[in-house]
Structure formats: C-alpha cells, structure tokens
Amino acid sequence: MAKATFGAGCFWGVESAFRQAKGVTDAAVGYMGGTLAHPTYEDVCTDRTGHAEVVQLDYDPAQTSYQELLRVFFDTHDPTTLNRQGPDYGKQYRSVIFFHDAEQERAARKMKEELDGAGRFPRKIVTQIAPASDFWRAEEYHQRYFEKRGIAACRAH
C-alpha cells in the first residue's frame, strides 16, 4: 500500500472522485500544509492557518499507478485558478499535490510540465507541489460527506 495526498478545492467532491478510482482502498479528508496543530474546519476557514483542504488516499500500486491518480487529480478540478475552485476561494481551496517521496515529486512535476506544454488548459497551471507534512483528519461529519447525504457522486473523467 502507498499514500497520496491532493488538494483540489472543497474536499467533499475530491474525496468522492478518488473513492471511485481503481486501486484506491481508502480515502480521508483533512488538512495539510499549515502552521496550526490540530486545526478545525473553522480554523482553516479563517484562511490564516495556511492549510489546504486535502484528500489523503491509501492505494494499491499493483492496481493503479501514481500517474493515474495524478490524471484523476487534474481531471477533477481547474488547476489554473489560484486559491479558488468554483465559488470557493481562499488558500484552503488551492490546487496542491503533497508528495510523500522523491518518485511522487518527480511524477507530479513531470505531469504538470507535460500538461502545460500540451496546452490542455487555457491558462498556466498554478498547482503547488510540496512535501507532505502532518495530515490532520477533518471532523467526522466531513468524511464521506456525499455518501452520508445521498448526493450523487462526482465522476472522474
């Protein structure tokens, strides 16, 4: 098993998309990349802690590659908007890949460069690529949010 951590806006839809991805065995929503230990949702929403809303995945590399997870990541949000996804804005909604090892960092940088070079998006990709830090699991009511409310799941492209 391996870990991957992505921030792509509000974590509810991102979690839903990744739960459908082949090889993902578990997903949890939470916060990463900030300065406050044990942040709450209310703390993160102040836009002063530096955390991003993220989804941390456990996945089986025998069933899927990290590159495939990167494809899901780039397909489920707009990586060209700085600190914003749709109507949500603030640093907590930034596009960010938190890598867990050098191989993940290389793969993330390579895919970002390739996508920018291919002109897939109308503007330059602003996704941050940063080392993973402490993952703070979000409150339980945020976990599997769409499932609990019977909301149709987001579909990864």
Image (cartoon, rainbow, N blue to C red):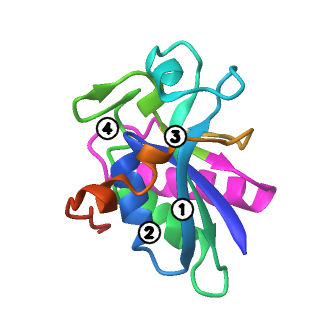
> Which numbered disc flags the more N-terminal residue, 2 or 3?
2
Cα gap from disc 4 to disc 1, whole angstroms: 30 Å
Disc 2 residue type (three-letter): Arg
Disc 1 residue type (three-letter): Ala
Q: Residue furthest right?
A: 102
Q: Which residues are magenta?
A: 98-126
Q: Dot 1 lies on which element?
A: strand
User: Which residue is under mark 3?
Assistant: 139
User: Which residue is under mark 1?
Assistant: 27
Disc 3 residue type (three-letter): Glu
Cα gap from disc 2 to disc 4, whole angstroms: 28 Å
User: Which residue is under mark 2?
Assistant: 19
- Tags 2 and 4 touching, CB below 8 Å: no
The residue positioned 60% from the left and 52% from the top of the image is: 5
Cα gap from disc 4 to disc 3, whole angstroms: 34 Å
Pick the quarter of the image with the N terminus: bottom right
Whether residue 82 appears in this view of the structure is no
Closer to viewer: mark 2 or mark 3: 3
